[in-house]
Image: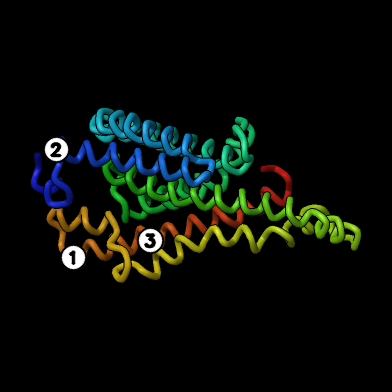
Amino acid sequence: MNSVGDAVVRIGPALGVVVVVLAAVAVAVNYLGHTGYWRESMVATLRAAVQLAALAAVLGVVIQRFWASALFIAIMACAAAWTSADRIAGRRGTWRRAVRCLLPVALSTVIIVAALVIIGVLPATGLAVIPTAGIMFGGAMNTASLAGRRAHDELHTRSGEVDAALALGLVSRDARLEICRSAAATALVPGIDQTRSVGLVTIPGAFVGMVLGGASTTAAAVMQLFVLISLLAVSAIAAVMTTELVARQLL
């Protein structure tokens, strides 16, 4: 065991038991509470265990070669887009939806990360690029999923208002956008609240990890600020682009 890992949580058999118990609690509460997500909780837990084990095995090799890191990032982008397409459609997403979801989920991240590498803010190494891109992909994916789902729900609930707007002469895109934009924008609330409350309510993992790794608290705070602001940027882009695609009936 390493001292950094033990400083956060003591790794051992007891931790394994705790993880299993907490996973069982999540599944049981979802089942008994009739949330409809107990199976998804169970599948998500199993997938997380398998995927993190695979990541631990593969990442050490991938980060040594930049081309391999770029390929790994492309796989991450496709997985994020497929997940959002699935959530937005309310059923298994098709590959066409997944390709369209690459726009809100991945495009902004790729552009920002590439720009950071070009100007020298981010080292051109897998160790730096993969985690940065992964954090941004995750934020954009969550925002796109929520924005798309809420936009569809709002359009379904207020379909009569869409018809009324069409009757008044608005084109389909404008009528749908007028109805769903506000609901879709609520997908930005979690990220904004996370940024507003950082240091007061939450102490993010990137900050803790850097401090435990030996960085100064100032350097850790600057890095965490970069992460939070980059998430705000990609999330805003993801929300607006997703809403636009839903309004145009492309998602």
Q: Residue at x 18, y 65 (%)?
A: 217
Which label was assigned to residue 217?
A: 1
Q: Which label's residue is closer to the chain start, 1 or 2?
A: 2
Q: Residue furthest front?
A: 32
**How many C-alpha atoms fall within 10 Å of the one at disc 1: few (<14), some, or many (≥20)?**
some
Q: Which one is closest to the eye, mark 1 or mark 2?
A: 2
218 vs 180, nearest the viewer: 180
Q: Which residue is mark 3?
A: 228
Residue 135 falls left or right of residue 170: left
| Cα distance in 3D space between marks 1 and 2 | 28 Å
95 vs 154, nearest the viewer: 154
| Cα distance in 3D space between marks 3 and 2 | 32 Å
Residue 67 falls left or right of residue 213: right
Q: How many marks?
A: 3
| Cα distance in 3D space between marks 3 and 1 | 16 Å
- Quadrant where the N terminus lies? top left
Q: Position of residue 239 (x, y in %)?
A: 57, 55
- Quadrant where the C terminus lies? top right
Q: Residue at x 35, y 58 (%)?
A: 227
Task: Residue type at mark 1: give it.
Answer: Thr
Task: Residue type at mark 3: give it.
Answer: Leu
Q: Which residue is mark 2?
A: 12
150 vs 118, nearest the viewer: 150
Which label was assigned to residue 133?
A: none
Q: Position of residue 16 (x, y in %)?
A: 21, 36
Q: Position of residue 189 (x, y in %)?
A: 50, 63
Q: Residue at x 12, y 47 (%)?
A: 6
Q: Position of residue 84 (x, y in %)?
A: 54, 42
Quick one: SS at disc 2? loop
Q: Are marks 3 and 2 in contact (CB under 8 Å)?
A: no
Q: Which label's residue is closer to the chain start, 3 or 1?
A: 1
